[in-house]
Amino acid sequence: MRLRHHFSFVELFVYISILGLISNISLVTYSKYIELNNYTEQISNQIMCTVNVGELWRRDIAESNEKSTYNENIFLIKRKNELISYKVESSTLFRKTHQIKKWYPVLHNIKYIQFSNRSKTYAEIWDLDIELKQIKEKVHTKPLFTFIGVRKI
């Protein structure tokens, strides 16, 4: 007489339930991973854009010929044969070269921005402080950036 081993209906039901539970847990974990990945990509793009704008501003200051000025929300830099302007409107930083004569946005989602002058007798020194709006509210670290532009006199 041969013994045959068969699965009972209860055993089959238990196996299917365990498989369903494991697949649900993995789907929830995967969706959280996708959400975190998208958030990280947004933050990375924001940081990269801010650093690029800061470096552009620093280069404009370093290559300027005359003293830069800041009044009435417009920062003016006189560089060689051109005049470069920066202005902030509705949480966006705009840049304009007077050869192109059009304002174009260089940085979005600005919560706070400040240009400050702390020049010395040997150098013109400007600070650019930028705080970006947070994408998520429960983040403990504020997205703050400070750039220092220096022109030797």
Image (cartoon, grey):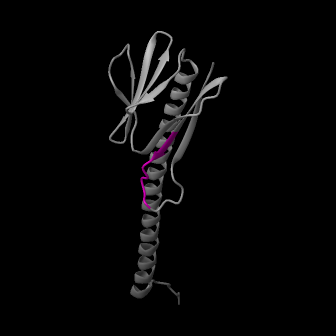
The image shows residue 142, relative to residue 127, as above or below, that is below
Q: In this view, does 113 lie to the left or right of 91?
A: right
Q: Magenta stretch? A: 129-137
Is 134 in the magenta? yes
Residue 73 x %, y %: 38, 33
Is 114 in the magenta? no
Name the one closer to the observer, 134 or 146: 146
Name the one closer to the observer, 105 or 35: 105
Residue 77 x %, y %: 47, 21
Which residue occupies 44% across, 13% down? 82
Quarter of the image where one finds residue 55: top right
Quarter of the image where one finds residue 106: top left
The image shows residue 123, relative to residue 1, as above or below, that is above
Name the one closer to the observer, 51 or 79: 79
Which residue occupies 47% across, 56% down? 36
Which residue occupies 46% across, 84% down? 6
Residue most extreme to the front: 121
The number of callouts visible is 0
Residue 127 x %, y %: 55, 35
Which residue occupies 51% across, 49% down? 143
The image shows residue 53, relative to residue 77, as above or below, that is below
The image shows residue 133, relative to residue 99, as above or below, that is below
